[in-house]
Image (cartoon, rainbow, N blue to C red):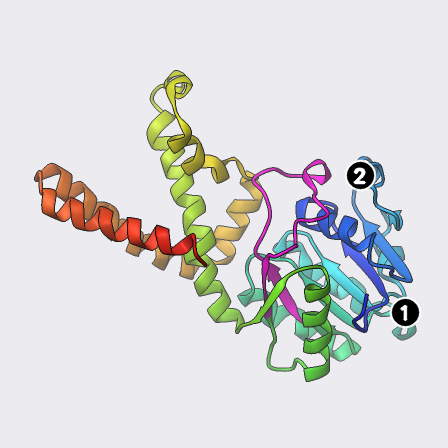
Amino acid sequence: MKCAVKSVAVIGPGVLGGSLALALSDAGLEELRLWGRREAALDGAIGAGFSGRVTTDFEEAVRGVQLVVLAVPVGVMPDLARRIANLPESERPLWVTDVGSVKGSLAGELPAVLDPAGVSFVGAHPMCGSEQSGIGAADRNLFRGARCFVCPGETTSDSALEVVRSFWSEVGCEVHSIDAAEHDAVVAKISHLPHVLAAVAAIGALREDTEMGRFAGNGLRDTSRVASGGVAMWTEILLENQQAVAEALKEAGKTLEAFEQAVAQADAARLTALLAEAKALRDDLATL
């Protein structure tokens, strides 16, 4: 890599962590490690082409590397941060980043643990992934062209921010710096709300009779695709970003109510206006 990072530990061999580990296998790092709880997942990473060291020992994975990337559920990150901070000073990483979908809670908790230990945390969220899970769904090209939010905190140094921005840029991301609270408000609308609406589409269409799904075309399949994402992961994401998601759902509910009323009242003009607005917004999205 051309940036300052020469050694990396990726924590978690899921879709994002596994994809990052595979991408970094081609980056010419001096040291690359991958940690996972299950040996089967680590074996899968090796089978997919991961060329670094694998281990189920967390301390072994992070000891002495420059950068640790946390690709695990947001709820377990504070505990892992404490384990990093408890390493002997000479064995602690210089920087920690992550791939978590929610940043508000981490922005306070992780620096509070890591700053006193001399470790800089700079949160990140690459906007890519899959409704599939596990190392079997990993893709070494996943980050190519993906947008990535980087969320500096109040104590983030310019040098640490530049290192983490450069790291994500090197793996192929288009990097954008954003405040953690603003990030959570944005992703509540563009990521978390769509997941809930996909779930609503699946339930609304199929709950009464799942056999009707055999007749479904691409409309239902495309609209509900992300509802196949991990249930435990998405429960955590929605509750970690509770306030912003609740606000987004409230606004979306107003739009659903407007559609309901327009249909019930046979208000063609109102339906036309709503559908035309949606079409224009979706057409614009395709150009971004």
- The magenta stretch is 122-150
Q: Main secondary structure of the magenta part?
A: loop
Total numbered badges shown on the rendered structure: 2
Q: How busy is the neighbourhood of tag 1: few (under 14 within 10 Å), some, or many (20 plus)?
A: some
User: Which amino acid, by three-letter code, is at mark 2?
Assistant: Ala
Residue 139 among those drawn in magenta: yes
Pick whichever, 1 or 224, lies toward us.
Answer: 1
Mark 2 vs mark 1, foreground winner is: 2
Residue 164 among those drawn in magenta: no
Which mark is on residue 79? none
Residue 101 drawn at (x, y percent): 56, 56
Residue 229 drawn at (x, y percent): 54, 39
Pick whichever, 203 or 28, lies toward us.
Answer: 28
Q: Is residue 202 above or below residue 140?
A: above
- Residue where numbered disc 1 is placed: 91
User: What residue appears at the point 79 percent right and 55 percent down from the top-left corner?
Assistant: 24
* Separation of residues labelled 2 and 1 (CA atoms): 29 Å
**SS at mark 1 in the image:** helix
Quarter of the image where the N terminus is located = bottom right
The numbered mark, 2 or 1, whose residue comes first in the sequence reads 2
Q: Is residue 105 above or below residue 203?
A: below
User: What residue appears at the point 85 percent right and 54 percent down from the top-left corner?
Assistant: 33
Quarter of the image where the C terminus is located = bottom left
Which mark is on residue 48? 2
Residue 83 drawn at (x, y percent): 79, 62
Residue 226 as seen in the image, left or right of residue 206: right
User: Which amino acid, by three-letter code, is at mark 1?
Assistant: Glu
